[in-house]
Amino acid sequence: MSRLVIKFGGTSVGSADAIRRAATLTHDLRTAGHQVVVVASAMSGVTDQLLGAAYAAAAGRASQVHDTVAILRTRHLDACQSLLARADYVTRAAIEQRLGDLARLCDALAVLGEASPRALDAVASLGERMSVVLLAAAIHECGTPAVAIDAADIVRTDGVHQAAAPDMDETRRLARAALGPLCEGGTVPVVTGFIGARADGAVTTLGRGGSDYSAAIVGAAIDADEVWIYTDVDGVLTADPRVVAEARTLDVLSFREMSELAYFGAKVLHPKTILPALERGIPLRIKNTFNPGHPGTLVVAQGTDAGVLKGVTAIEKQSLVTIEGRGMLGVPGIAARAFGAVARTGTSVPMISQASSEQSICFVAPQSAVGRVIEALEHEFDRELARQDIERIWALGEVVVVTVVGSAIQKVPGVAGRVFGAIGDAGVNIIAIAMGSSECSISLVVASADAAPALRHVHRLLEA
Ligand code: ADP
Ligand code: ASP
Ligand code: MG
């Protein structure tokens, strides 16, 4: 008998049918004798709608808020009605209460005329707070006792709204106290993904797509034997199936490989999910709710070397920022100052490449942040610019970072050559290159129109 944390993503709880499947899977695992803790996302699309309503409220667009509340009410209450045989007043009332919270929060935002990160978290949290009520009721309906749990009561975080980090010691204490007795007594806790709370009780979120991270946090907190991520594809694929039709499921990956794939754009798993699992040595499994017989992908400490290259990913809508000037040659501290200035804008940089001549530094930043990044750099280097030690700070957008991942890259000679050859065969120009410091990835910057051909050509190397 194992203790499992299983997470259902947005599509997996996106309709009454999907919720019924998720509930049946949970019930079957319980019946097979496992202790099960469920972590659930909001119904697909709901978080976007909630945030849209918050921005609309702050901008004074009351009718949009009203429409969104109505759409969310219909979707959740229809699912409730379809899932539960008897009129279930408790479940309906719980959903109505959350919709009431949404309307009240939006009223407050309309009065203030602005949406702070703290307020956005309060609004965004409501999707998970509604979906868990439905899923818990549906599991109950299958004959397994289940109870909805608000992660604000068990995941303690810092106060960085919209990207909160867990306090693992406190989370461990809270989660064990709340979930342990339920699991041992045969009840399935159904925990809201994505959210947590500060010590003063204010709700926080872990970042978009963060329910995967929640599952790993809860798994680490209660010493789960495995964490299973149920999604809408058969596991981690060699590429995004929406771009590369030939993409196939990977059987096994190491934590490092998974971390690189996720960090460089494989949306199937939130990149932060790896760390809590790795620290406690908890294997992750990525499985398909809609094809549960498929074994999916297992992510463990030691992967396999079979196939040097495991997967290829893309991060879209990026810009390439370049700082250039002959006066930078050999001057210590330029890079530190540059990245210090970028960090102060709150922008994360997925890739850096510096020419060895030290006459230029280039790095990639999200296109949406590039205006404030350049402003910050010009401010930081105003004297160097005036003296023309730095000649230009400029950005090339829109570009895509294409990354090839495989832990054997470091051991096998000629891999980079094969990758560049494949890109050349696609007739694609490489704008910049970086080899991941973990030596398990190679990243290339290409123009956005070239991304799909580059991905497909590099993908052919994976099949060799
Ligand atoms: P969930 O709501 O279950 O968290 P997501 O939409 O966040 O699901 O992630 C699953 C999606 O990730 C898949 O439907 C797929 O389109 C996309 N995806 C991108 N890259 C990959 C990859 N390498 N392997 C699997 N899926 C990928
Ligand atoms: N519902 C949240 C989001 O859409 C978290 C998640 O789905 O993982 O970002
Ligand atoms: Mg996701």
Image: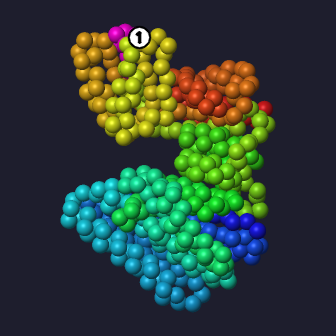
**Can residue 215 be seen in the rendering of this structure?**
no
Neighbor class of circle 1 (other Cα within 10 Å; few <14, some 14-19, many 20+) is few
Residue position marked by numbered label 1 in the rendering: 330
Q: Is residue 58 above or below residue 372?
A: below
Give the quarter of the image for residue 34: bottom right
Q: Which residues are magenta?
A: 322-330
Magenta span contains residue 158: no
Which of the colour schemes (rainbow, by chain, secondary structure, one colour) is used? rainbow
Asked whether mark 1 and ligand 1 are closer than 8 Å, the reply comes as: no
Residue under the image location 46 percent in, 69 percent down:
153
Left or right of 138: which side holds 108? Answer: left
Give the quarter of the image for residue 156: bottom left
Magenta span contains residue 326: yes
Left or right of 387: which side holds 137? Answer: right
Q: Callout 1, which amino acid?
A: Gly
Residue under the image location 39 percent in, 25 percent down:
336
Left or right of 271: which side holds 333? Answer: left
**Front one among 200 and 344:** 200
Image quarter hosting the C terminus: top right
Left or right of 159: which side holds 311? Answer: right
